[in-house]
Image (spheres, rainbow, N blue to C red):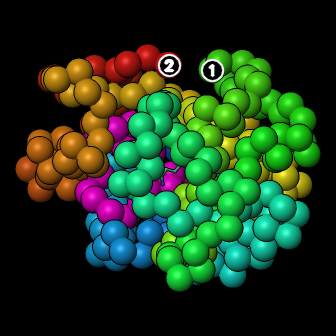
Amino acid sequence: MTVTRFAPSPNGPLHLGHAYSAVIAHDRAMEWGGRFLLRIEDIDGTRSRPELAEAFREDLAWLGLTWEEVPAQSTRLASYDTAARNLLERGLLYPCTCTRAEIEALEPHLGSEGLVYPGTCRGQTTDPGRPTALRLDVERALAEVGEVWWDDEIAGRIVADPREAGDVVIVRKDAPASYHLAVTLDDAVDGITVVTRGQDLFPATSVHRLLQALLGLPVPRWYHHGLLMDEDGKKLAKSRRSGERGYGLAELRRAGEDGPALADRLRRGDFPAGITLASA
Ligand code: GLU
């Protein structure tokens, strides 16, 4: 049975790009009588706004989608902690006290994941008095598991390249897991068989595939869909406040738009004025 999920973070309102992603995941599951799950990704306690989770449910219902909701990340912290300890005991994580400003000052090259950590704290003794994150030692991890690959429903068989994202954070300074650890564990626990997500998360998938191999988790398939771009040719994004500038689902709902009709337009690739699809 196909099990997909939509996993929004409640740190800003949803926009048309989220609707597109949710419709793809929903339809992919429903095609063969599968399950479409909603998981609220609220690992980031400082940026999460609980009232947005309720707004997300209203958005999905307005689009005419049906789903099963699984527990939010904030209720799963103990399982993240157990997995992180396992990796730490195997020498695959190292403490890092660097701040973002310090990392930027070292002029690291910019990877497609954003800032790639140059490994400053790897093999060093860190100051226990400073807030500490735990990072994955990618080279050690690869030495343990060898080459890993995944089946992508659009791109075919892909060899994971976790070096592109570098030594990512696994345990944050302010939370028992990073996005990477939490999403990998959650997808396994929730029995996800096809991870549907935007192309922008392609480099992250390599990290998740590596974590699955390290933790002995089941391997799903992936479907990386194209991204919706605004009139400036930039992807719709919470960081660009796309959910508050005319493309927000709550905004469109309040303006009296017909949700199921919008979902059907997204299915057909008939996008609202100004929106284009950067194809996968
Ligand atoms: N929670 C992530 C977000 O809101 C996406 C989840 C995923 O597909 O990994 O962008």
Q: Is-magenta flag for residue 146?
A: no
- Residue positioned 67% across, 25% down in the render: 153
In this view of the protein, which residue sits in the foreground, 2 or 11?
11
Count every numbered label the image shows and give the total: 2
Which residue shows up at 83% across the image and 33% down it? 148
Amino acid identity at mark 2: Ala
Q: Which mark is residue 154?
A: 1
Quadrant in which residue 118 is drawn: top right
Residue beneath disc 2: 280
Above or below residue 54? Residue 7 is above
Is 265 drawn above or below residue 250 in the view shown?
above
Q: Is residue 203 above or below residue 269?
A: below
Can see residue 30?
no
SS label for mark 2 = loop
Q: In the drawing, does residue 252 fall left or right of residue 59?
A: left
Q: Is residue 253 left or right of residue 156?
A: left
Label 2 with label 1: CB-CB less than 8 Å: yes
- Tell whether position 6 is magenta: yes
Write the start and end of the magenta stretch as one range.
1-23
| Mark closer to the chain start, 2 or 1 | 1
Q: Amino acid at mark 1?
A: Ile
Mark 2 → mark 1, Cα distance in angstroms: 8 Å
